[in-house]
Image (cartoon, helix red, strand yellow):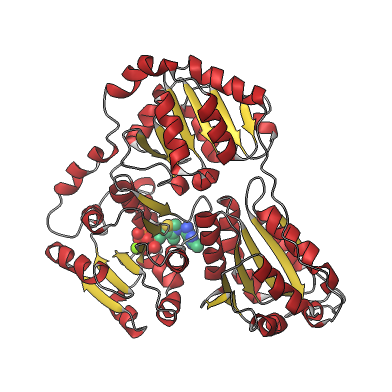
Amino acid sequence: MTGGKAVARALSCERVHFLFEYTGSHVLHIYDALRNEKSIRRITVRHENTASFMADTVGRLTGEPGVCLVTAGPGATNSLTGVATAYASASPTIHLSGATPPKDQVGSFHGVDDPFFLEKIFKPVTKMSTRIDNPSKAPEILSKSFALSKTGRKGPVHVSLPQQFQQQVAKVGRYECGEITSRRATDSQLRRISAMLGDSKKPVICLGEEAVHLPAREIIFLAEKISAPVISIIEALGVFPQNHRLFAGYFDEYFEHPISKRVIEDSDCMLIIGLRPASPCAKFLETHGSPNKAFLYEEPVPAISEVPAAIGNVNLNTHLLAQSVSSEEQIDRRNWLHGEKLATHKYTTNQIAKWHKTIHPGYAMTALIPFLHNNCILATDVGSSEVWVRDCVTIWHRSRHLYAGQYGAMGFALPAGIASKLLYPNRQVISIVGDGGLLMSNGELATVAQHAVDLKIIVLNDSRLGMIWQLQRQRFAGRYASVDLSRVNFAKVAQSFGLKGVRIEDRAELRRAYEQILNSKGPGLLDIVIDPEAPYLF
Ligand SMILES: Cc1ncc(C[n+]2csc(CCOP(=O)(O)OP(=O)(O)O)c2C)c(N)n1
Ligand SMILES: [Mg+2]
Protein backbone atom coordinates (compact mmCIF):
# COMPACT_ATOMS: atom_id res chain seq x y z
CA MET A 1 0.00 0.00 0.00
CA THR A 2 1.26 3.55 -0.66
CA GLY A 3 1.72 6.06 2.12
CA GLY A 4 -1.05 8.15 0.54
CA LYS A 5 -3.47 5.20 0.77
CA ALA A 6 -2.41 4.50 4.35
CA VAL A 7 -3.36 8.08 5.30
CA ALA A 8 -6.72 7.92 3.50
CA ARG A 9 -7.52 4.56 5.11
CA ALA A 10 -6.60 5.89 8.56
CA LEU A 11 -9.03 8.81 8.17
CA SER A 12 -11.76 6.43 7.15
CA CYS A 13 -11.05 4.06 10.07
CA GLU A 14 -11.19 7.04 12.44
CA ARG A 15 -14.63 7.87 10.98
CA VAL A 16 -13.61 11.31 9.76
CA HIS A 17 -16.72 12.68 8.01
CA PHE A 18 -15.37 16.05 6.93
CA LEU A 19 -11.89 16.83 5.70
CA PHE A 20 -11.23 20.56 5.42
CA GLU A 21 -8.58 20.95 2.79
CA TYR A 22 -6.68 22.90 0.18
CA THR A 23 -4.53 21.03 -2.26
CA GLY A 24 -1.05 21.51 -3.71
CA SER A 25 1.62 19.53 -5.53
CA HIS A 26 3.07 18.12 -2.29
CA VAL A 27 -0.10 16.26 -1.26
CA LEU A 28 -1.46 14.89 -4.53
CA HIS A 29 -0.90 11.22 -3.69
CA ILE A 30 -3.12 11.59 -0.66
CA TYR A 31 -5.83 13.22 -2.74
CA ASP A 32 -5.59 10.43 -5.26
CA ALA A 33 -6.17 7.88 -2.51
CA LEU A 34 -8.99 9.94 -0.97
CA ARG A 35 -11.02 9.59 -4.16
CA ASN A 36 -11.82 6.02 -3.06
CA GLU A 37 -12.90 6.99 0.46
CA LYS A 38 -16.53 7.77 -0.17
CA SER A 39 -17.42 8.36 3.48
CA ILE A 40 -15.07 11.34 3.75
CA ARG A 41 -16.55 14.59 2.49
CA ARG A 42 -13.86 16.94 1.25
CA ILE A 43 -14.58 20.61 1.89
CA THR A 44 -12.28 22.68 -0.25
CA VAL A 45 -11.74 26.01 1.46
CA ARG A 46 -10.42 29.23 -0.06
CA HIS A 47 -7.60 29.89 2.40
CA GLU A 48 -5.80 27.28 4.49
CA ASN A 49 -6.34 29.12 7.75
CA THR A 50 -10.06 28.59 7.47
CA ALA A 51 -9.41 24.84 7.11
CA SER A 52 -7.78 24.81 10.52
CA PHE A 53 -10.54 27.02 11.98
CA MET A 54 -13.10 24.53 10.65
CA ALA A 55 -11.21 21.56 12.09
CA ASP A 56 -11.10 23.41 15.41
CA THR A 57 -14.87 23.97 15.26
CA VAL A 58 -15.50 20.24 14.78
CA GLY A 59 -13.20 19.51 17.72
CA ARG A 60 -15.02 21.94 19.99
CA LEU A 61 -18.53 20.88 19.04
CA THR A 62 -18.04 17.11 19.01
CA GLY A 63 -15.02 16.39 21.23
CA GLU A 64 -13.69 14.28 18.33
CA PRO A 65 -10.75 15.55 16.29
CA GLY A 66 -11.55 17.81 13.36
CA VAL A 67 -9.15 17.15 10.50
CA CYS A 68 -7.56 19.41 7.93
CA LEU A 69 -5.15 18.71 5.10
CA VAL A 70 -2.95 21.33 3.47
CA THR A 71 0.03 21.35 1.20
CA ALA A 72 3.63 21.85 2.29
CA GLY A 73 5.25 25.26 2.77
CA PRO A 74 2.85 28.17 2.27
CA GLY A 75 -0.25 25.99 2.64
CA ALA A 76 0.93 24.81 6.02
CA THR A 77 2.16 28.17 7.27
CA ASN A 78 -1.10 29.80 6.16
CA SER A 79 -2.95 27.47 8.50
CA LEU A 80 -0.82 28.09 11.59
CA THR A 81 -3.14 30.66 13.19
CA GLY A 82 -6.04 28.22 13.22
CA VAL A 83 -3.86 25.56 14.82
CA ALA A 84 -2.78 28.02 17.54
CA THR A 85 -6.45 28.89 18.05
CA ALA A 86 -7.29 25.22 18.60
CA TYR A 87 -4.36 24.85 20.98
CA ALA A 88 -5.47 27.79 23.12
CA SER A 89 -9.04 26.47 23.20
CA ALA A 90 -8.08 22.85 23.98
CA SER A 91 -9.76 21.68 20.80
CA PRO A 92 -8.84 18.25 19.40
CA THR A 93 -7.66 18.56 15.80
CA ILE A 94 -5.41 16.72 13.38
CA HIS A 95 -3.40 18.93 11.10
CA LEU A 96 -1.95 17.06 8.11
CA SER A 97 0.44 18.76 5.75
CA GLY A 98 2.78 17.94 2.94
CA ALA A 99 6.49 18.17 3.71
CA THR A 100 9.83 17.97 2.04
CA PRO A 101 12.08 14.89 2.30
CA PRO A 102 14.75 15.11 5.01
CA LYS A 103 17.67 15.02 2.57
CA ASP A 104 16.63 17.85 0.25
CA GLN A 105 19.23 20.42 -0.69
CA VAL A 106 19.50 23.85 0.86
CA GLY A 107 16.74 26.17 -0.32
CA SER A 108 14.90 23.42 -2.17
CA PHE A 109 11.81 23.60 0.01
CA HIS A 110 10.17 26.58 -1.68
CA GLY A 111 13.39 28.48 -1.00
CA VAL A 112 13.46 27.61 2.71
CA ASP A 113 16.55 25.77 3.97
CA ASP A 114 15.41 23.62 6.86
CA PRO A 115 13.41 20.58 5.67
CA PHE A 116 12.07 20.13 9.22
CA PHE A 117 10.87 23.68 9.58
CA LEU A 118 7.16 22.81 9.54
CA GLU A 119 7.47 20.35 12.39
CA LYS A 120 9.39 22.99 14.33
CA ILE A 121 6.87 25.75 13.60
CA PHE A 122 3.92 23.65 14.72
CA LYS A 123 5.60 22.24 17.81
CA PRO A 124 4.80 25.10 20.22
CA VAL A 125 1.10 25.12 19.27
CA THR A 126 0.39 21.39 19.23
CA LYS A 127 0.40 18.47 21.65
CA MET A 128 2.70 16.67 19.22
CA SER A 129 4.36 17.66 15.96
CA THR A 130 5.69 14.73 14.00
CA ARG A 131 6.29 13.29 10.53
CA ILE A 132 5.86 9.97 8.78
CA ASP A 133 8.67 8.78 6.51
CA ASN A 134 7.64 5.17 5.94
CA PRO A 135 4.15 3.88 5.06
CA SER A 136 4.54 0.93 7.43
CA LYS A 137 4.69 3.44 10.31
CA ALA A 138 1.52 5.29 9.24
CA PRO A 139 -1.06 3.30 11.26
CA GLU A 140 0.91 3.58 14.49
CA ILE A 141 1.70 7.29 14.18
CA LEU A 142 -1.73 8.34 12.97
CA SER A 143 -3.59 6.29 15.56
CA LYS A 144 -1.38 7.75 18.28
CA SER A 145 -2.06 11.25 16.90
CA PHE A 146 -5.83 10.82 16.99
CA ALA A 147 -5.78 9.36 20.48
CA LEU A 148 -3.41 12.01 21.83
CA SER A 149 -5.46 14.90 20.48
CA LYS A 150 -8.45 13.82 22.58
CA THR A 151 -6.70 12.52 25.68
CA GLY A 152 -6.19 14.68 28.76
CA ARG A 153 -6.23 18.37 27.85
CA LYS A 154 -7.38 18.12 24.25
CA GLY A 155 -5.55 19.89 21.44
CA PRO A 156 -4.09 19.78 17.96
CA VAL A 157 -1.51 17.34 16.57
CA HIS A 158 0.53 18.12 13.47
CA VAL A 159 1.72 15.39 11.10
CA SER A 160 4.09 16.18 8.22
CA LEU A 161 3.67 13.85 5.26
CA PRO A 162 6.57 14.06 2.77
CA GLN A 163 5.83 13.33 -0.87
CA GLN A 164 8.19 10.35 -0.99
CA PHE A 165 6.31 8.74 1.88
CA GLN A 166 3.01 9.29 0.09
CA GLN A 167 4.31 7.57 -3.06
CA GLN A 168 6.33 4.79 -1.48
CA VAL A 169 4.82 1.27 -1.43
CA ALA A 170 5.33 -0.84 1.68
CA LYS A 171 3.59 -3.49 3.71
CA VAL A 172 1.15 -1.67 5.96
CA GLY A 173 -0.48 -3.45 8.90
CA ARG A 174 -4.06 -3.17 10.15
CA TYR A 175 -5.22 0.22 11.36
CA GLU A 176 -6.37 0.14 14.94
CA CYS A 177 -7.88 3.19 16.59
CA GLY A 178 -6.04 4.13 19.78
CA GLU A 179 -7.73 3.53 23.08
CA ILE A 180 -8.71 6.49 25.21
CA THR A 181 -8.62 5.83 28.89
CA SER A 182 -10.79 8.05 31.06
CA ARG A 183 -8.75 8.85 34.10
CA ARG A 184 -10.81 9.01 37.26
CA ALA A 185 -10.04 11.21 40.26
CA THR A 186 -9.19 9.39 43.46
CA ASP A 187 -11.79 9.08 46.20
CA SER A 188 -9.69 11.20 48.52
CA GLN A 189 -9.43 13.99 45.91
CA LEU A 190 -13.21 13.99 45.51
CA ARG A 191 -13.80 13.81 49.29
CA ARG A 192 -11.56 16.82 49.87
CA ILE A 193 -13.46 18.91 47.34
CA SER A 194 -16.85 17.72 48.63
CA ALA A 195 -15.86 18.73 52.15
CA MET A 196 -14.73 22.13 50.96
CA LEU A 197 -18.01 22.72 49.14
CA GLY A 198 -19.91 21.45 52.18
CA ASP A 199 -18.26 24.10 54.35
CA SER A 200 -18.93 26.89 51.90
CA LYS A 201 -21.83 29.30 52.30
CA LYS A 202 -21.27 31.01 48.96
CA PRO A 203 -19.86 28.63 46.37
CA VAL A 204 -19.49 29.51 42.70
CA ILE A 205 -18.82 27.20 39.75
CA CYS A 206 -16.46 28.57 37.09
CA LEU A 207 -16.36 26.87 33.70
CA GLY A 208 -13.21 26.91 31.56
CA GLU A 209 -12.43 25.96 27.96
CA GLU A 210 -12.40 22.22 28.59
CA ALA A 211 -15.91 22.37 30.03
CA VAL A 212 -17.29 22.71 26.50
CA HIS A 213 -17.57 18.93 26.34
CA LEU A 214 -19.57 18.69 29.58
CA PRO A 215 -23.16 17.56 29.12
CA ALA A 216 -25.41 20.38 30.36
CA ARG A 217 -27.38 17.99 32.59
CA GLU A 218 -24.27 17.18 34.66
CA ILE A 219 -23.44 20.76 35.40
CA ILE A 220 -27.08 21.67 36.03
CA PHE A 221 -27.40 18.78 38.49
CA LEU A 222 -24.26 19.82 40.37
CA ALA A 223 -25.11 23.54 40.41
CA GLU A 224 -28.66 22.92 41.65
CA LYS A 225 -27.54 20.42 44.25
CA ILE A 226 -25.12 22.85 45.88
CA SER A 227 -27.04 26.02 44.93
CA ALA A 228 -24.05 27.55 43.23
CA PRO A 229 -24.23 30.19 40.53
CA VAL A 230 -22.35 29.25 37.37
CA ILE A 231 -20.04 31.59 35.51
CA SER A 232 -18.25 30.73 32.33
CA ILE A 233 -15.34 31.83 30.22
CA ILE A 234 -16.54 33.03 26.86
CA GLU A 235 -15.61 29.87 24.94
CA ALA A 236 -17.86 27.86 27.24
CA LEU A 237 -20.90 30.15 27.02
CA GLY A 238 -23.91 28.00 26.28
CA VAL A 239 -22.65 24.90 28.09
CA PHE A 240 -24.73 25.92 31.10
CA PRO A 241 -28.09 27.25 29.87
CA GLN A 242 -28.22 31.04 29.94
CA ASN A 243 -31.90 30.95 30.86
CA HIS A 244 -31.24 28.92 34.02
CA ARG A 245 -31.81 30.79 37.30
CA LEU A 246 -28.23 30.00 38.40
CA PHE A 247 -26.51 31.37 35.31
CA ALA A 248 -24.40 34.35 36.38
CA GLY A 249 -22.56 35.52 33.27
CA TYR A 250 -19.07 35.31 31.86
CA PHE A 251 -15.56 36.28 32.74
CA ASP A 252 -12.26 36.64 30.94
CA GLU A 253 -8.78 37.73 31.88
CA TYR A 254 -9.64 41.35 31.03
CA PHE A 255 -13.29 41.80 31.92
CA GLU A 256 -16.36 40.27 33.42
CA HIS A 257 -20.09 40.76 33.34
CA PRO A 258 -21.34 42.91 36.26
CA ILE A 259 -23.18 39.92 37.75
CA SER A 260 -20.24 37.53 37.47
CA LYS A 261 -18.03 40.26 38.95
CA ARG A 262 -20.23 40.39 42.03
CA VAL A 263 -20.43 36.62 42.28
CA ILE A 264 -16.63 36.25 42.00
CA GLU A 265 -15.96 38.93 44.59
CA ASP A 266 -18.59 37.73 47.09
CA SER A 267 -18.05 33.99 46.89
CA ASP A 268 -16.21 32.10 49.61
CA CYS A 269 -15.29 29.09 47.46
CA MET A 270 -14.65 28.58 43.74
CA LEU A 271 -15.05 25.25 42.01
CA ILE A 272 -13.08 25.69 38.78
CA ILE A 273 -13.94 23.15 36.10
CA GLY A 274 -11.82 22.65 32.98
CA LEU A 275 -9.93 25.92 33.18
CA ARG A 276 -6.21 25.68 32.66
CA PRO A 277 -4.53 26.36 36.01
CA ALA A 278 -2.10 29.31 35.99
CA SER A 279 -3.58 30.56 32.70
CA PRO A 280 -4.44 34.29 32.58
CA CYS A 281 -8.14 33.49 33.19
CA ALA A 282 -7.29 31.33 36.21
CA LYS A 283 -5.00 34.09 37.49
CA PHE A 284 -7.86 36.53 37.08
CA LEU A 285 -10.03 34.39 39.38
CA GLU A 286 -7.17 34.10 41.84
CA THR A 287 -6.74 37.86 42.01
CA HIS A 288 -10.43 38.75 42.25
CA GLY A 289 -12.03 35.76 43.97
CA SER A 290 -11.84 33.70 47.12
CA PRO A 291 -8.53 31.98 47.97
CA ASN A 292 -10.63 28.88 48.68
CA LYS A 293 -10.62 27.08 45.39
CA ALA A 294 -10.68 23.60 43.92
CA PHE A 295 -9.88 22.49 40.38
CA LEU A 296 -11.34 19.78 38.21
CA TYR A 297 -8.68 19.43 35.55
CA GLU A 298 -7.59 16.85 33.02
CA GLU A 299 -3.91 16.61 33.89
CA PRO A 300 -1.72 17.01 36.97
CA VAL A 301 0.14 20.33 36.67
CA PRO A 302 2.47 22.00 39.19
CA ALA A 303 0.18 25.04 39.53
CA ILE A 304 -2.40 22.98 41.40
CA SER A 305 -0.22 20.53 43.30
CA GLU A 306 -1.02 22.30 46.58
CA VAL A 307 -4.75 23.00 46.15
CA PRO A 308 -7.69 20.57 46.26
CA ALA A 309 -7.96 19.12 42.77
CA ALA A 310 -9.69 16.21 41.07
CA ILE A 311 -7.39 15.16 38.26
CA GLY A 312 -8.63 13.27 35.22
CA ASN A 313 -11.55 13.26 32.83
CA VAL A 314 -13.52 16.43 33.60
CA ASN A 315 -16.88 14.97 32.52
CA LEU A 316 -16.46 11.86 34.61
CA ASN A 317 -15.19 13.70 37.66
CA THR A 318 -17.93 16.35 37.50
CA HIS A 319 -20.40 13.49 37.51
CA LEU A 320 -18.69 11.75 40.45
CA LEU A 321 -18.45 14.97 42.43
CA ALA A 322 -22.11 15.77 41.84
CA GLN A 323 -23.01 12.34 43.19
CA SER A 324 -20.80 12.60 46.25
CA VAL A 325 -21.31 16.22 47.27
CA SER A 326 -23.74 16.82 50.06
CA SER A 327 -26.75 19.04 49.45
CA GLU A 328 -27.55 19.56 53.11
CA GLU A 329 -26.24 23.09 53.11
CA GLN A 330 -28.74 24.18 50.50
CA ILE A 331 -31.02 25.99 52.95
CA ASP A 332 -28.13 28.06 54.32
CA ARG A 333 -27.25 29.23 50.85
CA ARG A 334 -30.55 30.88 50.14
CA ASN A 335 -29.19 34.32 51.10
CA TRP A 336 -26.30 33.88 48.73
CA LEU A 337 -28.56 33.70 45.75
CA HIS A 338 -31.82 35.34 46.57
CA GLY A 339 -30.79 38.80 47.80
CA GLU A 340 -30.73 39.91 44.22
CA LYS A 341 -31.64 37.69 41.30
CA LEU A 342 -28.91 36.68 38.89
CA ALA A 343 -30.69 38.59 36.14
CA THR A 344 -27.75 38.92 33.81
CA HIS A 345 -29.67 40.58 31.02
CA LYS A 346 -31.22 43.47 32.89
CA TYR A 347 -27.94 45.36 32.69
CA THR A 348 -28.11 45.83 28.97
CA THR A 349 -31.48 47.18 27.96
CA ASN A 350 -31.61 50.73 29.37
CA GLN A 351 -28.57 52.17 27.65
CA ILE A 352 -29.48 50.73 24.29
CA ALA A 353 -33.02 52.06 24.45
CA LYS A 354 -31.71 55.66 24.65
CA TRP A 355 -30.19 55.42 21.19
CA HIS A 356 -32.66 56.45 18.53
CA LYS A 357 -31.34 57.69 15.25
CA THR A 358 -28.76 55.28 13.95
CA ILE A 359 -28.57 51.51 14.33
CA HIS A 360 -26.99 50.85 17.69
CA PRO A 361 -25.17 47.49 17.42
CA GLY A 362 -26.61 46.43 20.78
CA TYR A 363 -30.09 47.26 19.55
CA ALA A 364 -29.49 45.23 16.38
CA MET A 365 -28.37 42.27 18.47
CA THR A 366 -31.24 42.51 20.96
CA ALA A 367 -33.69 42.65 18.06
CA LEU A 368 -32.19 39.40 16.79
CA ILE A 369 -33.28 37.39 19.84
CA PRO A 370 -36.91 36.70 18.76
CA PHE A 371 -35.57 35.15 15.57
CA LEU A 372 -33.27 32.69 17.31
CA HIS A 373 -34.14 29.04 17.70
CA ASN A 374 -33.48 27.27 20.95
CA ASN A 375 -30.06 25.69 20.88
CA CYS A 376 -28.90 27.65 17.85
CA ILE A 377 -25.17 28.04 17.25
CA LEU A 378 -23.77 31.56 17.12
CA ALA A 379 -20.25 31.87 15.77
CA THR A 380 -18.66 35.22 16.51
CA ASP A 381 -15.52 36.92 15.33
CA VAL A 382 -13.01 39.03 17.22
CA GLY A 383 -13.85 42.71 17.60
CA SER A 384 -16.74 44.82 18.81
CA SER A 385 -19.16 42.44 17.10
CA GLU A 386 -18.18 39.77 19.63
CA VAL A 387 -18.82 42.18 22.50
CA TRP A 388 -22.32 43.05 21.29
CA VAL A 389 -23.25 39.43 20.70
CA ARG A 390 -21.99 38.43 24.11
CA ASP A 391 -23.65 41.24 26.03
CA CYS A 392 -26.92 41.43 24.18
CA VAL A 393 -27.58 37.91 22.89
CA THR A 394 -25.67 35.03 24.43
CA ILE A 395 -26.15 36.36 27.92
CA TRP A 396 -29.94 36.00 27.47
CA HIS A 397 -30.58 33.29 25.01
CA ARG A 398 -30.02 29.54 25.12
CA SER A 399 -27.46 29.30 22.36
CA ARG A 400 -24.10 27.65 21.88
CA HIS A 401 -21.53 30.36 21.53
CA LEU A 402 -18.51 29.73 19.32
CA TYR A 403 -15.82 32.29 19.73
CA ALA A 404 -12.26 32.61 18.42
CA GLY A 405 -11.14 32.03 21.99
CA GLN A 406 -8.15 33.18 23.91
CA TYR A 407 -5.92 33.27 20.83
CA GLY A 408 -8.30 35.89 19.46
CA ALA A 409 -7.86 35.53 15.71
CA MET A 410 -10.05 37.59 13.41
CA GLY A 411 -11.63 35.71 10.52
CA PHE A 412 -12.97 32.88 12.71
CA ALA A 413 -16.72 33.42 12.59
CA LEU A 414 -17.41 32.58 8.95
CA PRO A 415 -15.46 29.30 8.81
CA ALA A 416 -16.73 28.32 12.27
CA GLY A 417 -20.29 28.87 11.06
CA ILE A 418 -19.70 26.83 7.91
CA ALA A 419 -18.27 23.86 9.83
CA SER A 420 -21.09 24.05 12.41
CA LYS A 421 -23.79 24.00 9.76
CA LEU A 422 -22.12 21.12 7.92
CA LEU A 423 -22.07 19.16 11.18
CA TYR A 424 -25.59 20.07 12.25
CA PRO A 425 -27.67 20.78 9.14
CA ASN A 426 -30.87 20.89 11.19
CA ARG A 427 -29.72 23.50 13.68
CA GLN A 428 -29.91 27.22 13.10
CA VAL A 429 -26.36 28.54 12.65
CA ILE A 430 -25.48 32.23 12.40
CA SER A 431 -22.06 33.78 11.95
CA ILE A 432 -21.84 37.31 13.33
CA VAL A 433 -18.82 39.23 12.17
CA GLY A 434 -17.38 42.72 11.82
CA ASP A 435 -16.44 44.15 8.43
CA GLY A 436 -12.72 43.66 9.18
CA GLY A 437 -13.20 40.01 10.16
CA LEU A 438 -15.30 39.33 7.08
CA LEU A 439 -12.74 40.95 4.79
CA MET A 440 -10.18 38.53 6.23
CA SER A 441 -12.28 35.48 5.43
CA ASN A 442 -14.75 36.41 2.70
CA GLY A 443 -13.28 33.95 0.20
CA GLU A 444 -15.27 31.38 2.19
CA LEU A 445 -18.50 32.86 0.85
CA ALA A 446 -17.57 30.82 -2.21
CA THR A 447 -17.35 27.72 0.00
CA VAL A 448 -20.80 28.49 1.39
CA ALA A 449 -22.20 28.78 -2.11
CA GLN A 450 -20.39 25.73 -3.50
CA HIS A 451 -21.70 23.41 -0.79
CA ALA A 452 -25.05 25.19 -0.43
CA VAL A 453 -24.40 25.56 3.30
CA ASP A 454 -27.57 27.08 4.74
CA LEU A 455 -25.61 29.50 6.90
CA LYS A 456 -26.81 32.96 7.86
CA ILE A 457 -24.24 35.71 8.16
CA ILE A 458 -24.76 39.01 9.95
CA VAL A 459 -22.19 41.75 9.41
CA LEU A 460 -21.99 44.57 11.95
CA ASN A 461 -20.54 47.02 9.49
CA ASP A 462 -18.89 50.13 10.94
CA SER A 463 -16.34 50.70 8.15
CA ARG A 464 -13.54 50.49 10.69
CA LEU A 465 -11.58 48.22 13.00
CA GLY A 466 -14.03 49.14 15.71
CA MET A 467 -12.53 47.43 18.74
CA ILE A 468 -9.14 49.00 18.13
CA TRP A 469 -10.84 52.35 17.47
CA GLN A 470 -12.53 52.01 20.90
CA LEU A 471 -9.15 51.32 22.52
CA GLN A 472 -7.62 54.35 20.85
CA ARG A 473 -10.55 56.44 22.03
CA GLN A 474 -10.19 55.25 25.64
CA ARG A 475 -6.45 54.90 26.04
CA PHE A 476 -4.95 57.27 23.48
CA ALA A 477 -7.33 60.23 23.90
CA GLY A 478 -8.83 59.69 20.48
CA ARG A 479 -5.54 59.67 18.56
CA TYR A 480 -6.75 57.25 15.91
CA ALA A 481 -4.33 55.46 13.61
CA SER A 482 -4.85 52.84 10.90
CA VAL A 483 -8.36 51.85 11.89
CA ASP A 484 -10.33 53.06 8.88
CA LEU A 485 -11.64 50.44 6.47
CA SER A 486 -13.22 51.71 3.33
CA ARG A 487 -16.98 51.38 3.00
CA VAL A 488 -17.91 48.01 1.57
CA ASN A 489 -21.36 46.88 0.54
CA PHE A 490 -21.31 43.28 1.76
CA ALA A 491 -24.80 42.58 0.44
CA LYS A 492 -23.43 43.09 -3.06
CA VAL A 493 -20.34 41.04 -2.24
CA ALA A 494 -22.59 38.19 -1.07
CA GLN A 495 -24.74 38.46 -4.17
CA SER A 496 -21.68 38.23 -6.38
CA PHE A 497 -20.93 34.85 -4.75
CA GLY A 498 -24.49 33.69 -5.41
CA LEU A 499 -25.84 34.24 -1.88
CA LYS A 500 -28.85 36.26 -0.89
CA GLY A 501 -27.61 39.67 0.32
CA VAL A 502 -29.53 42.43 2.11
CA ARG A 503 -28.14 45.74 3.40
CA ILE A 504 -29.84 48.11 5.84
CA GLU A 505 -28.96 51.54 7.22
CA ASP A 506 -32.16 52.41 9.08
CA ARG A 507 -33.28 50.65 12.25
CA ALA A 508 -36.89 50.67 11.09
CA GLU A 509 -35.84 48.13 8.46
CA LEU A 510 -34.22 45.74 10.92
CA ARG A 511 -37.11 43.43 11.66
CA ARG A 512 -38.04 42.90 8.04
CA ALA A 513 -34.42 42.33 7.11
CA TYR A 514 -34.07 39.61 9.76
CA GLU A 515 -37.22 38.01 8.43
CA GLN A 516 -35.88 38.10 4.90
CA ILE A 517 -32.56 36.50 5.76
CA LEU A 518 -33.26 34.29 8.77
CA ASN A 519 -36.69 32.98 7.89
CA SER A 520 -35.90 31.99 4.33
CA LYS A 521 -34.16 28.89 3.07
CA GLY A 522 -30.63 29.02 1.74
CA PRO A 523 -27.51 30.94 2.63
CA GLY A 524 -27.89 34.65 3.18
CA LEU A 525 -26.01 37.67 4.44
CA LEU A 526 -27.39 40.70 6.22
CA ASP A 527 -25.14 43.76 6.12
CA ILE A 528 -26.15 46.06 9.00
CA VAL A 529 -24.61 49.52 8.83
CA ILE A 530 -24.22 50.31 12.52
CA ASP A 531 -23.34 53.37 14.53
CA PRO A 532 -19.56 53.07 14.88
CA GLU A 533 -19.37 55.20 18.00
CA ALA A 534 -21.69 53.35 20.39
CA PRO A 535 -19.70 52.86 23.61
CA TYR A 536 -19.49 49.42 25.20
CA LEU A 537 -22.01 48.77 27.96
CA PHE A 538 -19.48 47.67 30.57
C1 LIG B 1 -5.78 38.11 12.80
C2 LIG B 1 -5.91 39.28 13.70
N1 LIG B 1 -5.35 40.47 13.35
C3 LIG B 1 -5.49 41.56 14.15
C4 LIG B 1 -6.17 41.46 15.33
C5 LIG B 1 -6.31 42.67 16.25
N2 LIG B 1 -7.73 43.12 16.29
C6 LIG B 1 -8.58 42.76 17.26
S1 LIG B 1 -10.12 43.34 17.07
C7 LIG B 1 -9.69 44.15 15.66
C8 LIG B 1 -10.71 44.94 14.89
C9 LIG B 1 -11.79 44.08 14.29
O1 LIG B 1 -12.50 44.84 13.34
P1 LIG B 1 -13.86 44.33 12.74
O2 LIG B 1 -13.75 42.93 12.31
O3 LIG B 1 -14.34 45.28 11.75
O4 LIG B 1 -14.80 44.31 14.02
P2 LIG B 1 -15.31 45.58 14.84
O5 LIG B 1 -14.42 45.70 16.04
O6 LIG B 1 -15.26 46.76 13.96
O7 LIG B 1 -16.71 45.19 15.22
C10 LIG B 1 -8.33 43.96 15.36
C11 LIG B 1 -7.61 44.56 14.21
C12 LIG B 1 -6.70 40.18 15.67
N3 LIG B 1 -7.35 39.97 16.82
N4 LIG B 1 -6.58 39.13 14.82
MG1 LIG C 1 -15.59 46.93 11.91
The image position of residue 97, as x and y in percent, is: 69, 72
In the depicted view, which residue is nearer to us: 391 or 146?
A: 146
The image position of residue 15, as x and y in percent, is: 62, 66
What residue sits 51% from the left and 29% below the top? 322
Is residue 130 depicted above or below 75 in this figure? above
- Tell me if 324 is positioned left or right of 151 in this view: left
Quadrant hosting residue 385: bottom left
What residue sits 43% from the left and 57% below the top? 382
- Tell me if 207 is positioned left or right of 526 in this view: right
In the depicted view, which residue is nearer to us: 468 or 243?
A: 243
Is residue 508 depicted above or below 192 in this figure? below
What residue sits 53% from the left and 21% below the top? 291
The image position of residue 87, as x and y in percent, is: 61, 54
In the depicted view, which residue is nearer to us: 274 or 224?
A: 224
The image position of residue 244, as x and y in percent, is: 33, 38
Q: Quadrant of the N terminus?
A: bottom right
Quarter of the displayed picture in which ligand 2 can be seen: bottom left
Q: Quadrant of the C terminus?
A: top left
Observer able to see residue 264 = no
Is residue 293 depicted above or below 110 in this figure? above
Observer able to see residue 141 = yes
Quadrant hosting residue 426: bottom left
